[in-house]
């Protein structure tokens, strides 16, 4: 079969990768790719250096952020900070991207 170019017209122009990632993110029930990037990439800005050193985000599904804490004490600390962290996420990525933080203790 000889080579033929793809049809031209509407929708044939290259699109930013972020657009495709946003579609995939929405299809699995998470916020935009940009929101995921902020939450996972700027975690220490959101929670502070000490908490970030002991608690890492591991998943986000339907506005519930799952975080692994290395020790029960850090788990408690993050639960106390939950309203503040959610407020900071709202400021950076928009409201309701995260409505709940689920903390699991997972020792190193």
Image: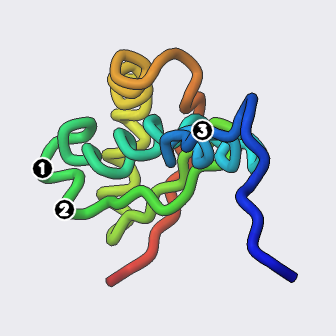
Q: Position of residue 73 (x, y in %)?
A: 31, 59
Badge 3 or badge 2: first in the primary sequence: 3
Asked if the residue at tag 3 contacts the one at tag 1, i.e. Cβ–Cβ closer than 8 Å, the answer is no
Which SS class for mark 2?
Answer: helix
Q: Tell me how far mark 3 sits from mark 2, CA to CA.
A: 43 Å
Residue 97 image position (x, y, % from top left):
56, 28
**Residue 86 appears at what percent x and percent y?**
43, 27
- Per the image, label 3 sits on a secondary structure element best described as loop
Displayed quadrant of residue 29: top right
Front position in the image: 1 or 25 = 1
- Mark 1 surroundings within 10 Å by alpha-carbon count, few (fewer than 14), some (14 through 19), many (20 or more): few
- Secondary structure under the numbered disc 1 in the rendered image: helix
The residue that appears at 71% across and 34% down in the rendered structure is 11
Mark 3 or mark 2: which is in front? 3
Along the line of sight, the residue nearer the viewer: 27 or 100? 27
22 shown above or below 52: above
Disc 1 to disc 2, how far (Cα)? 6 Å
Quickly name the residue at label 2: 53
- Which residue in the protein does label 1 denote? 49
Q: Which is more N-terminal, label 3 or label 1?
A: 3
Q: Residue at x 32, y 83 (%)?
A: 108
Q: Which mark is residue 13?
A: 3
In the image, taking residue 43 as reference, residue 60 lies left or right, namely: right
> How far apart, in angstroms, are the residues tagged by discs 1 and 3?
43 Å
């Amino acid at each position: 079969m000889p080579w033929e170019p793809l049809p031209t017209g509407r929708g044939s122009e290259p699109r930013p990768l972020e657009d495709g990632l946003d579609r995939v993110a929405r299809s699995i029930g998470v916020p935009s790719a940009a929101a995921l990037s902020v939450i996972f990439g700027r975690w220490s800005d959101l929670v502070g250096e000490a908490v970030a050193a002991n608690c890492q985000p591991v998943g986000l599904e339907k506005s519930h952020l799952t975080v692994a804490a290395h020790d029960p004490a850090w788990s408690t600390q993050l639960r106390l900070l939950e309203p503040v962290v959610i407020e900071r996420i709202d400021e950076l990525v928009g409201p309701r991207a995260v409505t709940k933080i689920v903390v699991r203790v997972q020792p190193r």
